[in-house]
């Protein structure tokens, strides 16, 4: 048995099971278990210090995988733009957790934050003011910024053989020349792209597709109906702060104020995320349709979604119904989900085990459960419930997994 140190003082015990190889770092691929997760009062990132709600002890060091992955011994100079935001901070932490081969890490933000210090996998670093010249000195650049910023700078950073740019905004998701990637599903689209620019999908889509892709592979998806229950973290650090402050105000007999959300979020649900479009869907709901079609390469797939903001901090939940092309074999469906990388099959109703924001928070895998035949579509239908950490699978983790999957091929 070999003991391996991970960044941020995590320890992994390496046994004879499948392992992940990143440079000189060896990591285990943990087994998927159906027993309830161990719960403790230890706080994790995204839960306020004053909160007494239980939380998972720690996320896995790596997202479970069924196949070994090899990155070359080469180490990269990585830049993260937007390091003071929730997603930027998570990207830095995930790079360390996964032992990403870093030669150097550079932190970029606005002039207001330049000069401040942050902890990274390579020690304390000073935040730099973003400039195009500085960003182009990197091998890989993660953008955790607004769509407007990305539209202005992404192509300039990656132009003429520049760095690999992985953009977390919506700026280029619907550009047919830019791959939109969930690496377990369509990493090859990024490897074949003529551009060194890759779009990270919307968090809701990324979480849903971790379950939908293996089911589509088995049965073919004919139609999809989805209702989402989205955490405050979808609106970034300001959204999480507004929820925390509102809950405290309620507890103290006061009134919750709202500036980030359309209405006060504590003890409320808001069926309104992003702006309303002419067809009465919100843009968030249409993102799920457009992005699901692009990632699965099903341009005519009917997808209908209702997106709802709920008062949880950082894990999105989604109730999904699919109609399939082939009759559903439940044992095969379960087998596909159990073996899918990045999926934790969490379904034992006899023990009250099913996906929840509480257990999915700060966890790399997307929890999938409540799997059952759909009464409307009969043998050709399936209902399921999924839950995933919006800042990880829906943003930072997916971005880092993209870099792991394609950097050696495109750089």
Image (spheres, grey):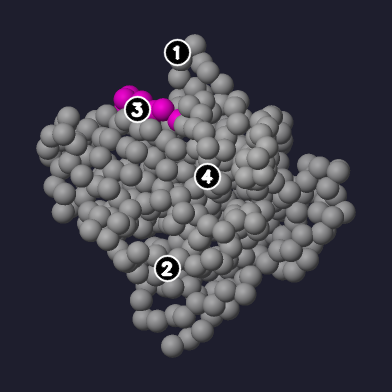
Q: CA distance from mark 2 to mark 4?
A: 20 Å
Horizontal placement of 82 versus 181: left or right? Answer: right
Q: Of helix, strand and loop, which one carries label 1?
A: loop
Instruction: Tell me, for residue 303, which label it has, or none.
Output: 3
Question: Residue visible at 17% across and 52% down?
Answer: 332
Question: Residue visible at 56% across and 21% down?
Answer: 275
- Provide residue 56's location: percent of width, then percent of height: 49, 63
**Is disc 4 in contact with disc 3, using a CB cutoff of under 8 Å?**
no
Residue 130 is a magenta residue: no
Instruction: Tell me, for residue 279, which label it has, or none.
Output: 1
| Stretch of the chain drawn in magenta | 300-307
The residue that label 2 is drawn on is 38
**Is disc 2 in contact with disc 1, using a CB cutoff of under 8 Å?**
no
Q: Of helix, strand and loop, which one carries label 2?
A: loop
- Tell which residue pokes out farthest to the bottom in this image: 1
Q: Residue 138 versus residue 381: which sits nearer the camera? A: 381
Q: CA distance from mark 3 to mark 1?
A: 14 Å
The nearer-to-camera label among 3 and 2 is 2
Question: Residue visible at 17% across and 41% down?
Answer: 373
How many other residues sit within 10 Å of disc 2, few (<14), some (14-19) or many (≥20)?
few
Residue 298 lies, with reference to residue 337, above or below; the image says above
The nearer-to-camera label among 4 and 1 is 4
The nearer-to-camera label among 4 and 3 is 4
Q: Residue 28 versus residue 56: which sits nearer the camera? A: 56
* Residue 407 in sight from this viewpoint: no
- Provide residue 45's location: percent of width, then percent of height: 60, 58
How many other residues sit within 10 Å of disc 3, few (<14), some (14-19) or many (≥20)?
some
Image quadrant where residue 68 sits? bottom left
Assign the N terminus to one quadrant of the image.
bottom left
Q: CA distance from mark 4 to mark 3?
A: 25 Å
The residue that label 4 is drawn on is 312
């Amino acid at each position: 048995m070999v003991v391996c140190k991970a960044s941020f003082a995590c320890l992994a015990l390496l046994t004879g099971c499948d392992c992940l190889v990143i440079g000189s770092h060896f990591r285990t691929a943990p087994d998927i278990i159906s027993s309830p997760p161990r719960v403790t009062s230890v706080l994790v990132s995204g839960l306020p210090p004053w909160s007494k709600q239980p939380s998972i002890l720690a996320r896995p060091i790596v997202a479970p995988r069924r196949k070994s992955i090899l990155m070359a011994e080469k180490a990269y100079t990585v830049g993260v733009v937007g390091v003071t935001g929730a997603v930027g901070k998570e990207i830095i932490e995930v790079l360390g957790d996964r032992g990403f081969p870093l030669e150097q890490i550079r932190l970029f933000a606005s002039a207001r934050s330049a000069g401040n210090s942050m902890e990274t996998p390579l020690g304390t670093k000073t935040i730099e003011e973003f400039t195009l010249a500085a960003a182009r000195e990197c091998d890989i650049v993660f953008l955790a910024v607004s769509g407007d910023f990305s539209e202005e700078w992404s192509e300039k950073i990656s132009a003429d053989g520049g760095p690999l740019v992985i953009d977390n905004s919506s700026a280029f998701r619907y550009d047919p020349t830019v791959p939109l990637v969930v690496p377990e599903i369509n990493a090859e689209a990024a490897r074949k792209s003529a551009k060194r620019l890759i779009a990270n999908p919307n968090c809701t889509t990324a979480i849903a597709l971790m379950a939908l892709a293996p089911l589509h592979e088995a049965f073919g998806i004919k139609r999809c109906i989805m209702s989402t229950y989205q955490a405050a973290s979808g609106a970034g650090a300001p959204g999480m702060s507004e929820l925390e402050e509102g809950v405290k105000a309620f507890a103290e007999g006061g009134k919750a104020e709202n500036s980030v959300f359309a209405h006060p979020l504590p003890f409320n649900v808001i069926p309104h995320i992003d702006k309303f479009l002419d067809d009465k869907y919100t843009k968030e709901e249409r993102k799920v349709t457009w992005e699901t079609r692009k990632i699965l390469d099903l341009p005519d797939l009917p997808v209908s979604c209702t997106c709802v903001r709920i008062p949880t901090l950082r894990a999105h939940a989604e109730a999904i119904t699919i109609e399939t092309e082939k009759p559903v074999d439940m044992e095969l469906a379960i087998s596909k989900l159990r073996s899918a990388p990045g999926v934790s099959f969490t379904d034992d109703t006899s023990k009250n085990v099913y996906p929840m924001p509480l257990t999915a928070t700060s966890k790399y895998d997307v929890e999938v459960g409540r799997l059952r035949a759909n009464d409307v579509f009969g043998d050709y239908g399936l209902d399921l419930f999924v839950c995933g950490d919006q800042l990880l699978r829906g943003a930072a983790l997916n971005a880092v997994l993209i870099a792991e999957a394609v950097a050696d091929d495109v750089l």
